[in-house]
Image (cartoon, helix red, strand yellow):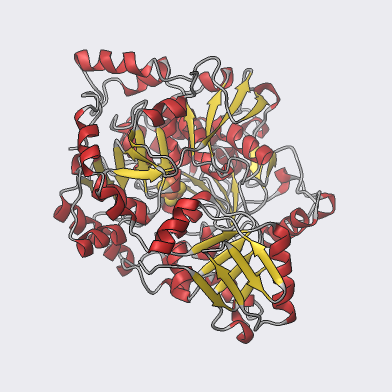
Amino acid sequence: MDAFTTHTGTAVPLQRSNVDTDQIIPAEYLKRITRTGFEDGLFASWRKDPDFVLNQPHHAGATILVAGPDFGTGSSREHAVWALQNYGFKVVISSRFADIFRGNSGKGGLLTAEVPQETVEKLWALIAADPATEVTVDLAAQQIRAGDLVADFAVDGYVRWRLMEGLDDIGITLQSGDAITAFEKQRPEFTPTTG
Amino acid sequence: MARTLAEKVWAAHVVRHAEGEPDLLYIDLHLVHEVTSPQAFDGLRVAGRGVRRPDLTLATEDHNVPTINIDQPIADPISRAQVDALRANCAEFKVPLYPLGSIEQGIVHVVGPQLGLTQPGMTVVCGDSHTSTHGAFGALAFGIGTSEVEHVLATQTLPLKPFKTMAITVDGELPPGVSAKDITLAIIAKIGTGGGQGYVLEYRGSAIRGLSMEGRMTLCNMSIEAGARAGMVAPDETTFEYVQGREHAPTGAAWDEAVTYWRTLPSDADAVFDAEVHLDATTLSPYVTWGTNPGQGLPLSGSVPSPANASDEVERTAIERALDYMGLVPGTLLREIPIDTVFIGSCTNGRIEDLRAVAEVLRGRQVANSVRMLIVPGSVRVKLQAEDEGLDTVFIDAGADWREAGCSMCLAMNPDKLAPGERSASTSNRNFEGRQGPGGRTHLVSPAVAAATAVVGTLAAPADLPALS
Ligand code: SF4
C-alpha cells in the first residue's frame, strides 16, 4: 500500500445525504473477480443523468469527494471503496460515515475525513464558486485547506498511522503469530469446526 | 466488574491487547460466499499466504445463484465466473464448500445456524453485512469487507476497536399478527438508519424472550439497517433447544460443558450500557416502509408522509426524493398502494417459520391476478422441510412461484429482478433505490403482511382478509 501523507486536488460536491453503498456501486457491477475496473459502476444509476455532478466537465479529474452526512451506509461491499479509488478519488469528506465503509476505506487506502457538516457546506460553497479550487487534505496535520478555509478533520488514530506508514494489516497481525497459536491452544473443546 | 453480553464475548476472544491499538480478536467461524471473497483469495495468492484455519471456515453459493433450472450451468457468464472462482479457491485452499446442488446449500446466514455452527458466545464474521443475524444466538457476529475477509483467512483474527453497547428493551406482549419483522421496522423507524452506529445492540425484554430463534434472527439480521455493527440476544433455553442435536452442536459431556458456559454469558444485572432504548410491544402493529431506506417505515394503518411535515431541510429533501423515486403521493393510505410483485425470502425472512406464516395466510386463498408472487426458501433444507409439511402445495395452489434456495430478489444479482417502476412488497431487508432491480420500488414487510398483500393486491395485513368460509 502507498503511504499517504498529504493530498492536493480538486473536489466534487455530492450534495446528498444517506448515500448507501448500493448507490455508490449497484450490485450488478459486483461480479468482477479482480480489484480493478470498478470505476464504470461508480454511482452508475445517477451517472445516467447528464445533470449529475460527476458528469460535469468542470469536475473531470477531481480526486476528492465532498458528500452529505451518512455516507457509505448499507451493504458492506468493499467494491464501493474500490469503485471510488478506481475512478480516481483519494479522499472522501463527510460529516458522518457508516462504520463498515469507513473501516473498508482505511484498509484500502482511501482516506475518509470526518468534519462538521458546517465545513462540508463551506467546501460546497467554495467549489460552487470555483470548481477549480484546490483542496489540500493534510493527514499529518489532520487539516483540510481550501481557499481561505482551514479546518481540522477527524480520523481514527490507528488508521492514520497505518495510512501514513503505508502498512498492510495482515503483515502487522502476522507478527503476533505466537500469540494467536497460544490463544488457539486454550479455546474450549466444544467450539465447532466446519470440516 | 459488571459486564454486558457483548463485552463478555469480546473479552473471551482477545488474542492481543495493547494501549492505543485495536484489540486483536480471534474469530471462531468465518462464513464465505462468492461475491466478497474472490479478491481476498487473490490477495492471499499474491502474498504467498495460506488459509490458517480452513476448519473454521465454510463457504456456500448464494448471492448470484439462479432459483430455477439449477441443474443447468449458470446462464450469466459473470455470475458463473464468480461461482467458478469460489469453487476453485475453496479447492485450492481446502475450504469446505456447499455448492449449488448440495443439500446444505443456501443463504450463508441461514446455513450457519441450521448446521449448528452458530453457537452462543462465538465470534462469527462473513463478508456480508447481515452477518448480524447470528447474534440471535448470543454470538458476536458482524459483517466485514473483503480486505478483512483476506485478513481472517490468513490469520483467523481481526484487529478491532471495541464497540459501544446499546440496550433495546422491548417489553410486553406482542399483539396478534405482529412479528419480529414489525419490531425491527418499528425500532429502525424510531432510532433511524444511523441510530445504532458504532453500537452492538442487545435486544432484551419480555417480548424478545418470547420470540423463537427464527424471530430473533430476523431481529438481529436487521440491526445493520439501524447502522449497528451487530445485534445480540442473550442465550436462553430457546437457544439451547434450537442448537441441540444439530450437526455441529456439541454432544455428551461437551454439550453440558458448553451449556454451563453459555449460561454465564447474559449481561450482568447491573451492567451499564452506553445507550438505552425502550419500546412497548403492546403498542406495535404491522409495519411497512414507504421510502427508500429501512428507517422510512410506518404502521400499515398510516399514510404516505408529506415533506411539508419534515422537521428540517435534510429530512424534507430526503422525503421528497424518496417519494419521487417511489412514485407516491403524500396522504395516500398505505393500504391503497397497489403491488405488482411479492417476494418472500432472504436471510431476514426466508426460514421455515416465515414460510409457515405465509402458508397460513395463503391456505385456501388465491394470489391476486395483478400480482406475481415469488417464494424463495433460504436454504435447500428449508425447501425440503417446507415440502415435507406440504407448504409448497399451498403456495402453488394459491398461484405463487416456488423456487430454489438463494438470495434471489433480495439483491437481484441473479435473474430475479423487478422491472423499472415495478413495485414490490418484500420480506427482505433493504428498500434502497434499485436494490431489487434498477428502477424497482420496494416496500419492506413481514411474511404475513406480504402474503396478505399478495391476496389483496394492495398493501394489507391478514386481518384485512375476509374469513374463509
Ligand atoms: S439474502 Fe439478501 S441480505 Fe441476505 S445475504 Fe443474501 S443478499 Fe445479503
Q: Quadrant of residue B65?
A: bottom left
Residue at (70, 77) in percent of width and height: A147
| Quarter containing the C terminus of chain B | top right
Can you say whether B243 is above or below A153 in the image? Answer: above
Q: Nearer the viewer, residue B56 or A145?
A: A145
Residue at screen point 53% across, 52% down: A74
Residue A136: % across, % down: 59, 73
Residue lying at the far bottom in this picture: please name it.
A57
| Residue A55 placement (x, y as % from top left) | 60, 81
Residue A145 against residue B127 in the figure, above or below:
below
User: What is the quadrant of residue B440 in the picture?
Assistant: bottom right
Q: Which residue is at 24% across, 38% downward?
A: A179
Please state the total of marks drawn on the protein image.
0
Counting from the top left corner in percent of width and height, residue B231 is at 49, 34
Q: Is residue A137 above or below residue B299?
A: below
Q: Is residue B288 above or below residue B266?
A: below
- Is residue B396 visible from the viewing direction of this image? no
Image location (x, y in percent) of residue A14: 64, 69
- Confirm whether residue B268 shows in the render: yes
User: With B449 as the anchor, is A176 left or right in this view?
Assistant: left
In front of the other: B442 or B223: B223
In the foreground, B125 or B8: B8
Q: Residue B460: name its quadrant.
A: top right
Q: In the displayed orientation, state which residue is furthest to the right.
A: B308
Q: Is residue B327 left or right of residue B26?
A: right
